[in-house]
Amino acid sequence: MKQTKELIMIVEDDRQIQDFIAYSLMTAGFGVLTAGGVEEAMRKMRSKKPDIMVLDLGLPDGDGLDLIRRVRKFSDIPIIVVSARDKEEDKIEALDRGAEDYITKPFSESELMARIRVLRRHLIREERNRMGAEVSVRGLKINFDAKEVTLDGNLLHVTPLEYQLLELLFHNIGKVITTRTLLDELYGVSYGDNTQSLRALMAGLRRKIEKVPGKPQYIVTEIGVGYRLKDE
Amino acid sequence: MEKYWKSPEEKEDNSLFYHIAIMCGIFGGTSMVAYAVSLKLISSEATIMLYLLCVFLVVWRTGRFSLGVITSIGSTMVYYYFFASPKFSYDMTTPPRYLLTMGIMISVALVTSGLISQVRQEALIAREKETLTEQLLRLNNDLAGAKSAEAIIGIALSAINEGVGCAAGYVAYDSGGKPGSRYVFQTVGYHTALTWYPMEEDENVRNRIQNGKTIFVRGKQYYEWPLRGHAGLMGAIRIRLEEQEKLDRTQLHLVRSIIDNIGMALDRFRTAELRIQAREEATQERFRSTLLRSISHDIRTPLTSISGNAEMLMKATKSEDYRYRMAKNIYDDAQNLSGMVENVLGITRLESGVEIKKEVEVAEEVIGAAVQLTEVHHPEYDIQVSVPEEILMVPMDASLIQQAITNLLENAIHHTKKKDGVAVILERKGNDAVFTVRDRGMGINPEHLDRLFEPFYQSNRSDQVVYRGFGLGLSICNSIVNAHGGRILARNRKDASGAEIIFTLPMEGEQ
């Protein structure tokens, strides 16, 4: 049984940010490892085997995206990418290549810790090798076996596609899912662009589960990137 | 610059007297040779041939058929008297012999003179062409070195002046086919200068120029020679009516060649200028976006650690501690700076005139995202959101509209103390999606209403906490909404105290 929590590697070239993240993580009880660039990160990946990676996409000596590609060849380590706003393409690309989630500069310590917690929970679920037949978050519950969704105990009538969408969101609870991933899973990799259909689907689903559809508490939109089912 | 061309009056115009002198000289010379020959040889055929040669030479040197005839007659008479038997007398018994000889000689004279003048004519034409080519080559050389459109026109006017002796002028035409208000004309004297004159109105001439059917158009004072390029009419060269009418065919041809070349040179010059301009603009654009990107990265990074560290200090300090307040101030300032950076970048992005990419989005989704973001920064506020039954699908750039709504919410929050006083309302009116952001503040001073969306405009309200920003937030909203083809306005609420800002976005036809 580990005394400390997981070992987190921070790949960041800016000294101040490195310090700030390291301090937040250490305060929360995590082990912290730092790397100032891609090559150093690769070395430490192999030698120290961290559990989670926080990676800044604006690295000087190489592409953060490239690091993800190289790491994914031999490891499933959960990766959170740090990027600036308006760099949607970079974020989406990182997520498509295998990053789990992202955070935007400037971010607060609480946002970062929330992301880390989500990854931890997923790690733990994987360790125990199951998600369980049921997952619930603040009254919204899904049953994977019965393929049912209930809200505060009442059965919700959802279309098969709506259920599939919820299932995807629950499997990735707390993490962001890119629009592209949702489209591929729900509509298949087909010709044409079903983005509008997806948005309409999401709007309809929100009207069923959210108290105020214009102010969603469960499924939030990350403009330009995708959606996230909030788990806290 | 030497003259491009000799005017016809200067062609060889040697006097008749001179030619007669040549004729006598050749005739005399021939006779002397004939006499010398006849002393040695008796053969008379050679002698008559000598006189034939004489006729040929006379016509060749003088170019005149008339003198050739005189020489023919004279040669026959001299020959038959002095050289043919019976010597020193005319044998009148066989007149046809004289006539035949004379006739042949005259024919030779005729053919020769015809040949001579044809050759001369062809030589003239060849010389003309050579000169023309030479001059145009020189003209093009001069044009190659021209550094501006004005220089090209200057070369054109000088070339016409020196080539055919006419003073010329130029008037520029704009892309709409309208001539400029002034034209330039040469004043020829010891020094040739260019003077500006006001352009006269002549719709008739303008129409005929635009029709483009003739090479030049006759106006009241000038002949106008239009210069046309790729993009259309560029300008027109002007030559005074009386001067042009004095020119012969050759000269007119030269003028036309000059003007054609000038037209091409001007066109080439303009195309090159446009290319350079486009390249410069592209370079500037690249520079600007690189600048934006590095500003974006370089400012956000330290802001992150400033606000992050301040936040942690806040957590590590008791709220009664004075240091908590200091940490909170640092944190708030960092947040403000962050907002300012976003706004400045937003304005520069929009200004560069990039076409926004619209996609059909669910309007309430974009509102939800904006509200979410705002509540993270102002957790004590509970923003009210109201959307219609119908799901409104609106074409927009989601990121920009989110930014606009966020700016409006920030603005509303800064004017509202009541924690649930800020509201966003989405409605449909006809073919427009209408977004309203309301606050419960003191309302807007009616004097400021039309200036609210100007950049850098801030209402100085001493009763409120000073909002330290550049005052760009509302002007960005204005730019974003306008770029979408929508409208935005601000007014005071009728149902309660406070203000509301309303913007509309056009929806496309029924989905």
Image: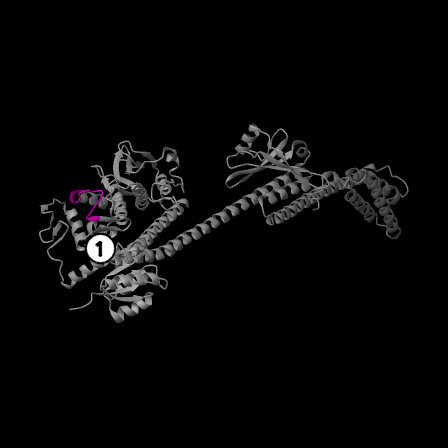
| Above/below status of B9 relative to A76 | above
Q: Is residue A107 visible?
A: no
**Residue A158 painted magenta:** no
Q: Nearer the viewer, residue B69 or A93?
A: A93
Q: Is residue A170 above or below residue B406?
A: below
Place residue A16 in its image quadrant.
Answer: bottom left
Q: Nearer the viewer, residue B420 or A100?
A: B420
Q: Is residue B484 among what the camera can see? A: yes
Q: Position of residue B454 (x, y in %)?
A: 40, 39
Q: Main secondary structure of the magenta part?
A: loop
Span colored in magenta? A207-219
* Three-letter code for the amino acid on which mark 1 is drawn: Lys
Q: Position of residue B472 (x, y in %)?
A: 38, 44
**B379 horizontally vs A124: left or right:** right
- Return the chain for callout 1: A
Q: Residue furthest bottom?
A: A47
Can you say whether A53 is above or below B67 in the image?
below
Q: Secondary structure at mark 1?
A: loop
